[in-house]
Image (cartoon, helix red, strand yellow):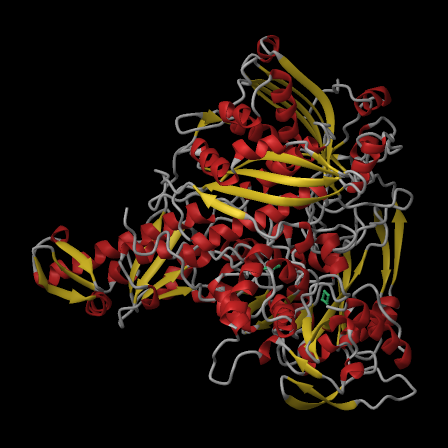
Amino acid sequence: MAYMHIGKNFVPPDVNGKVTGRIKYAEDYSREGMVYARLLTSPIPHARVVNIDASEALAMDGVFGVLTADDVYPDGEPQGTGLKVLTNEPTLVGEPILAVAAIDEKTAETAITKITVTFERLPFVLDPLDSLAEGGADAYTGGNTYVFRQGFAEEKWSQDQVASFRAGNEPTAEPQQTFAYGDLDAALAASAFVYEGTFTTAGYPHQSMEPRSAMAYWENGKLYLHGTSQSLSALADGMASIVGVPQEDFVFINEATGGGFGQRARANSIPSMAIPAKMSQKINRPVMMRITRDEETAIGGARQGFQGWIKVGFKADGTMAAADLYIVSDNGGKGGGGDAYSAADGISVLYQTEAVRFRGTSIGSNTGHRGAQRGPGQNQIAAIISPILDKAAEELGVDRMKIREINTPQTGDVGGAQRQPFTSAYMPEAFKIASEKFNYAERITRSRQRNGSKVTGIGIGQGYHNAGRSGMDGIVRLTADGRLKVHNGVGNLGTYSYASTSRAAAEVLQMPWERVDVVTGRTDRNLPITSPQDGSNSIFTNTRTNYGAAMDLLGKMKEIAAMELGGDAADYDIGDERVFKSSDKNAGMTFAQIAQKGIELGGKFTGESDLPEELNDFTKISVTRLAGDSLMGIFHDPKHNDNPPGFTVTFTEIEMDVETGKYDIVDMVTVGDCGTVVHPQGLKNQLVGGAVWGIGLAGYERHLYDPQNGLPASTGYWQSKIPTMMDTPAKIQTGWVDLPDPENPVGARGIGEPAMGAVAAAVASAISDSLDGHLFNSAPVTADMIINHVAGVTSDAVPLAQNNFRG
Amino acid sequence: MNLNLTRRRFIKGVIASGAAATTTGVWVAANGAARPAGAVERMIRINVNGQVRTVDVAPQETLASTLRYKLGLTGTKLGCNRGECGACTVLVDDVPSYACSVLTHSVKNGRIETVEGLESADGTLHPVQQAFVEELSPQCGYCTPGQIMAAVGLLRENPNPTREEARMGLSGNICRCGSYDSYLDGVMRAAQIG
Ligand code: FES
Ligand code: FES
């Protein structure tokens, strides 16, 4: 289909501000009379605050107030997992206990040194398996796990059960959660090759570049909060209730966000922004709270680590017949995350496994709080399963690409625990494009070739994430000057989807891009609600809403033309910013004239009546405020059918130095299947950005804690190393399938998360290949692990250790 | 980028000023209120983006603090405030330097350039900025000013770098969005635009 905007590059409105430094992040704002908040955070991993004496601090010159959990939660802290705004029951080092506001940060820091907090130390635990073992400490008060709707509970295995698991055996304890389909025993019996073993994947922090600083003030009963988020209106919706302010009286200002990878999608994963809001309310001054890198690392979220056992069976032709997983996932200090379930679900989707059983148990540790991080679950397991596929290929004498192609999902297939059909799936096409670009047939002959200390490794990986939601709202407006305003509640986290999804509306109305204004950045610009921007859903979800709103507007425009010029709305067409009779191009009105007429008519044309019944409350507030002064298109998106997947395929070649355990990624090709491509440059950025994350997961990223005192040893970038330019290829080749998905009006589905999983899988596969197919069963595989393996040295680390060094 | 040099200079400067070096990234250096005895001249003139500005600078104040909080030049970002990320990169006498790890007093005779100084008066973007727009190099944009200043410094020294040289030149700048490939595309295009 020939599109005007879809599939074309454009200059997003905010990119100029990004290259000139003019665009503002939360901490770039200031306000007359602004004072500064600093945090006192927990110095110990698990405690109860017995007493706070702030009298000396409060008596200091320049100190305006102290905010504690008692101020925030006068009726007591909510009982459940999840970060609190402030807490009297810290379960991780670095959790905010109180805030002090002062004339400047030095004074606030000095005041904090004068506050005496009396803590009652409680037992702490860093490794979920230590907590599971009978007699082990619990991370939370009241247990080591949280059961939905029931509260905290204690989950214990016998010491022998834990020891047996650590020794490499299948866990025998009852799991908390399970799903299964197919006849697992029969599938294993029919398998020609069965692999069984234990594995670990590490937890590590999100580390967005912009710390979660925030500034707040109150004016005329309204709260203005400058913050950071990856979903603008969805986060604002939740933040209003955390602060306890009616949505109508809350203005969330967030022009730009310095990176969001899961932990800025929802208000409850970034409740610290309520601190300046509450403090400002208490002391009646604007309050800026700058967050340091240490603080960001502590409360900025972390990926769930896995301690798992896996058994996979393959038929003689390479078909994956059975996958059996048992995963203990690390809920960290604040719980959260369904990574383990998603991991098993992801295997079922990506390899079309005939029989799957998943068993999982989530256990807390007094470490960084957990929650969704880019491809939660699917991406950890991608790095574990890929080398196992290679092992099966080797044992069965099947080509390594072939074993993946045999199992790959395609349109018409179902996948996952729910056995849901895909809206479309073009993985075979992705394999073809990627393997040709990589020149797989020739490259694979170099596998394991040695030159001095360097060995070539070839890797292949696949990524998947469910990539689309529905049920949200859209608002577009045509103003009296004939300009199109697309109100977009999508956050500006670096994907440019706030702009690219707006182009679906421009497409419907055939509007030149320079005649379109994307209205976003702060909620008092009257935005529609959208889904939290996690789960790679924005492009699917918000092209649907913007397209729908534009269709509503278009219908109204034609109706007005028919009222003015005669005939039926159906007799009219559009082009060149005019509505005209299909039979006579000259009989028509300009968009500006149509808008003016619509404003004159009012009622349903201007959002004053006949709103869609199911419109969300958040959107209703915006529509009500906008009603009357423009011609409006308003839309509530019904639910879509089936599972819109995002898929990726990656091929890579590495050169492993077996003397140092370091490797260079010589080449990488990564190809996405995300339906129709809406914005090629944006897609390329997601693919290369995801690649960097995948390289981090496979080879570098992990956080570490001191086992004696429970203190974090990783409090910034260099101790939990994220890949730099020197760790990533000098060039990453990208590509895409670009075939439409039928459940989306412009054919699009998401890509951000699978872009990482495929690369993690490919790098893990290449590392294994360069070492004669050795299975580390670990993510990351670090240089020390590689040289230990090459040297035949057995690590003395505790097997399956979590939040600590591993073998 | 000579990180060792800027880091060493920073530490020497801290010792000279009698202030305590903070390794925790706490923002105390931003405040002008402290006035340690053993006076260093506080009202100093610094040359920023070709303009000489008079500013009250505390002895232990970092260049990033002065730029952001005294001069309102918030284009220079702070990702870590302790020399780990490069978000604060500015040019000091053409050399890319971490502004969070340079004391303002130590560069008062230097020529400081920030991202705000690159555009020409008529609004024409610097070739690096223009190339970064065309390649859509930034994602979230938080590391972008630092990447741009590192690229400008590199291209002044080496106007036609190979991709590998560009990679080395920008390797002191972390990007959590992982936009490295697009930044390198941007630098190579900027070299062409010249
Ligand atoms: S802010 Fe200066 S290096 Fe990170
Ligand atoms: S573009 Fe987001 S950190 Fe670089």
Q: Is residue A376 visible?
A: no
Q: Is residue B75 above or below residue A679?
A: below
Q: Is residue A164 above or below residue B105?
A: above
- Residue drawn at (68%, 78%), measured in percent from left and top? B94
Q: Position of residue A67 (x, y in %)?
A: 74, 64
Going by the picture, which residue comes out furthest to the front?
Answer: A451
Residue located 56% across and 31% down the image: A346
Residue A701 is situated, as x and y percent measured from the top left of the image, at: 72, 45
Residue A581 at x, y percent in the picture: 10, 58
Ligand 2's quadrant: bottom right
Q: Is residue B72 left or right of residue A518?
A: right
Horizontally, is A12 left or right of A598 in the view?
Answer: right
Nearer-the-camera pick, A20 or B127: B127
> Height in image: A547 above or below A216?
above
The reply to whether residue A622 is in sight is yes
Numbered circles on residues, count: 0
| A679 is higher (above) or lower (below) than A122 | below
- Quarter of the picture containing the C terminus of chain A is top right
Task: Write the residue at 76% across / 28% down.
Answer: A155
Q: Nearer the viewer, residue A105 or B128?
A: B128
**Corner quadrant of residue A293:** bottom right
Of residues A269 and A605, the one drawn nearer to the viewer in this rendering: A269
Please identify the quarter of the rendering in which residue A309 is found.
Answer: top right
In depth, the one of A712 and A428 nearer the eye is A428
What is the x, y in percent for residue A222? Answer: 54, 69
